């Protein structure tokens, strides 16, 4: 009986060139076209996420927050679990809050990404239990160049690695027990924005003695460098590369041990360096920042991906970071984003231009201690409205988007300050997108954003908000006009297109995606007659 079930639930997915089983563990796979896909319960899954504030993964807060999470319409929540709460006494584990979180998420019909707040959180070590933090002789700390002890666990200490690892093993074992057949938990972030804030490296005596030695051959050989001390090999980047190597190895050891218990995809997130003077220590030194990805990849093979947290909303920095992290050896996933309109727009860029397997907005719940955030606790804050719109609309085409990623047939556009139009090429067509015209646009915000997928030679999917589109056959193709033969509004359900109405007349005249979002499937026909030549013919 069991055998039959396995045969029924496993299919060969040509698209992913893999055998995909409905009951298999969540997994990140590389598709035939080189882009990555996230598979959950046998189907492509794109994370449309929301992350909780740091101190919100507690029953008292969760109970009040579910309605707002529901209102946002995300498909995944990202929530921290705290080492200090899980192992308050050494070797004695408490999973009460973790269980509550998993059960609550499951009841809401959502998926969960757990964030292991343990040795490192935002470049410091606030989350280890008391028995770790109060015994620096046993669990050594980083020292800065003045010799001051910092609230950061030293990455060259095996005692620190072992303590964290032991707790993480217990956590993963427990998740397997309570969730192994449900897959509510689909991925785990190991630590949070790890690194050392306030120093470029560890100057404690054990770290110093390693720093004076030769760089491990495993690193120099792969980086095509000659052997030597850290300073000889890496010069000005010696301190940071040293920090990266030992931090990445630390986290890799923790992650690998957790995966032995329960093999979920695991990742590490970065506090990006692209602001300020960009010096290690201004951002957590050792973290997977954009110029250190190769070293991280080498030192931490147990991780499925390295992910940027992007609060830098401007178009060029955002796109730069997406480009950096969307690599042949690294799928793009953005676990944290700011909540301005620009990030709602940027989500489209991440999905449309950089094959992101997921995006998430930070700080969904209103129960936090930011005095500048005076939000109404009763309902979802208005600042999330554009994300709510995104998620509602994107859900109607997620599978199609995942299918188009990596084919070169999916692109994104987005309104920006002083950017009134964008011209794209897609197959035999030029498509002009423009912003700001709709008379019914209810505010001055830059809300225009769209995804464009090419479904066939003359067929396109356009999905988005507040954006006007116009098609022309490619210049020089011999054709002059693109007739819209049919424009169907609708959505995808279980892979099938569901038409809700047909746009024509005024709607096609304006060709503008509505403020509450539109998904259109458009069939075109190229013709050689255009208005100009018709007019000329009449005069002749
Ligand atoms: C980035 C961190 O990763 C989050 O945990 C949180 O502290 C935010 N910054 C702050 O808003």
Image: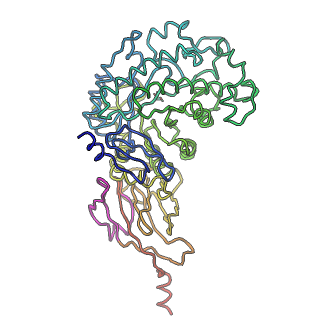
Is residue 495 on the magenta stretch? Answer: yes
Q: Is residue 263 above or below residue 16?
A: above
In front of the other: 189 or 22: 22
Number of marks in picture = 0
Quadrant of the snapshot with the N terminus: top left
Residue shown at the point (34%, 23%) measured from the top left: 174
Residue shown at the point (30%, 58%) measured from the top left: 496
Give how far across and how far down residue 138 sits, in percent. Answer: 53, 7
Image side of residue 242 versus residue 15, left or right: right
Give how far across and how far down residue 265 sits, in percent. Answer: 44, 35
The quarter holding residue 27 reads: top left
Work out whether residue 108 can be spotted: yes
Task: Please identify the residue farthest to the left as the structure is shown.
Answer: 1
Residue shown at the point (38%, 51%) measured from the top left: 12
Is residue 203 on the magenta stretch? Answer: no
Give how far across and how far down residue 516 sits, in percent. Answer: 33, 52
Give how far across and how far down residue 472 sits, in percent. Answer: 48, 71
Q: Is residue 405 above or below residue 253?
A: below
Coloured how?
rainbow
Q: What stretch is highlighted in magenta?
A: 486-513
């Amino acid at each position: 009986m069991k055998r039959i079930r396995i045969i029924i639930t496993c299919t060969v997915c040509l698209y992913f060139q893999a055998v995909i089983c409905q009951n298999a563990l969540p997994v990140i796979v590389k598709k035939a076209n080189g882009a990555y896909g996230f598979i959950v319960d046998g189907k492509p899954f794109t994370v449309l996420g929301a992350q909780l504030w740091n101190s919100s993964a507690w029953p008292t807060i969760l109970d009040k927050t579910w309605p707002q999470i529901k209102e946002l319409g995300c498909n995944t929540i990202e929530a921290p679990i705290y080492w200090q709460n899980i192992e308050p006494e050494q070797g004695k584990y408490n999973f009460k809050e973790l269980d509550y979180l998993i059960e609550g998420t499951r009841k809401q019909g959502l998926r969960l990404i757990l964030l292991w707040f343990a040795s490192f959180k935002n470049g410091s070590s606030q989350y280890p239990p008391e028995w770790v933090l109060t015994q620096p002789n046993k669990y050594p700390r980083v020292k800065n160049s003045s010799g001051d002890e910092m609230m950061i666990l030293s990455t060259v200490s095996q005692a620190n690695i072992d303590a964290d690892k032991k707790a993480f093993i217990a956590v993963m074992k427990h998740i397997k027990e309570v969730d192994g057949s449900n897959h509510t938990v689909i991925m785990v972030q190991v630590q949070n924005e790890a690194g050392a804030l306030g120093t470029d490296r560890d100057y404690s005596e054990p770290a110093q003695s390693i720093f004076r030695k030769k760089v491990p051959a495993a690193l120099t050989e792969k980086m095509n460098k000659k052997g030597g001390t850290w300073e000889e090999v890496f010069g000005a980047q010696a301190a940071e590369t040293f920090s990266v190597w030992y931090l990445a190895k630390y986290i890799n050891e923790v992650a690998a041990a957790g995966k032995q218990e329960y093999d979920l995809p695991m990742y590490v997130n970065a506090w990006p360096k692209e602001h300020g003077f960009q010096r290690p220590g201004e951002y957590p030194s050792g973290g997977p920042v954009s110029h250190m990805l190769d070293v991280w990849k080498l030192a931490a093979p147990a991780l499925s991906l390295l992910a940027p947290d992007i609060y830098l909303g401007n178009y060029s920095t955002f796109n730069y970071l997406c480009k950096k992290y969307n690599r042949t050896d690294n799928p793009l996933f953005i676990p944290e984003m700011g909540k301005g309109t620009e990030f709602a727009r940027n989500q489209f860029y991440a999905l449309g231009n950089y094959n992101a397997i997921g995006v998430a907005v930070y700080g969904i719940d209103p129960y936090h201690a930011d005095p500048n955030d005076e939000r109404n606790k009763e309902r979802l804050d208005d600042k999330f409205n554009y994300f709510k719109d995104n998620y509602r609309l994107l859900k109607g085409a997620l599978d199609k988007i995942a299918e188009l990623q990596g084919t070169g047939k999916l692109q994104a556009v987005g309104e920006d300050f002083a950017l009134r139009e964008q011209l794209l090429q897609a197959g035999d067509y030029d498509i002009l997108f423009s912003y700001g015209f709709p008379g019914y646009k209810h505010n001055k915000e830059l809300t225009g954003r769209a995804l464009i997928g090419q479904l066939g030679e003359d067929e396109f999917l356009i999905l988005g908000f507040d954006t006007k589109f116009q098609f022309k056959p490619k210049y020089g193709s011999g054709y002059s006009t693109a007739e819209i033969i049919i424009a169907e509004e609708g959505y995808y359900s279980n892979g099938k297109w569901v038409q809700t109405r047909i746009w024509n007349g005024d709607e096609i005249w304006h060709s503008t995606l509505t403020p509450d979002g539109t998904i259109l499937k458009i069939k075109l026909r190229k013709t050689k007659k255009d208005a100009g030549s018709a007019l000329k013919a009449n005069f002749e």
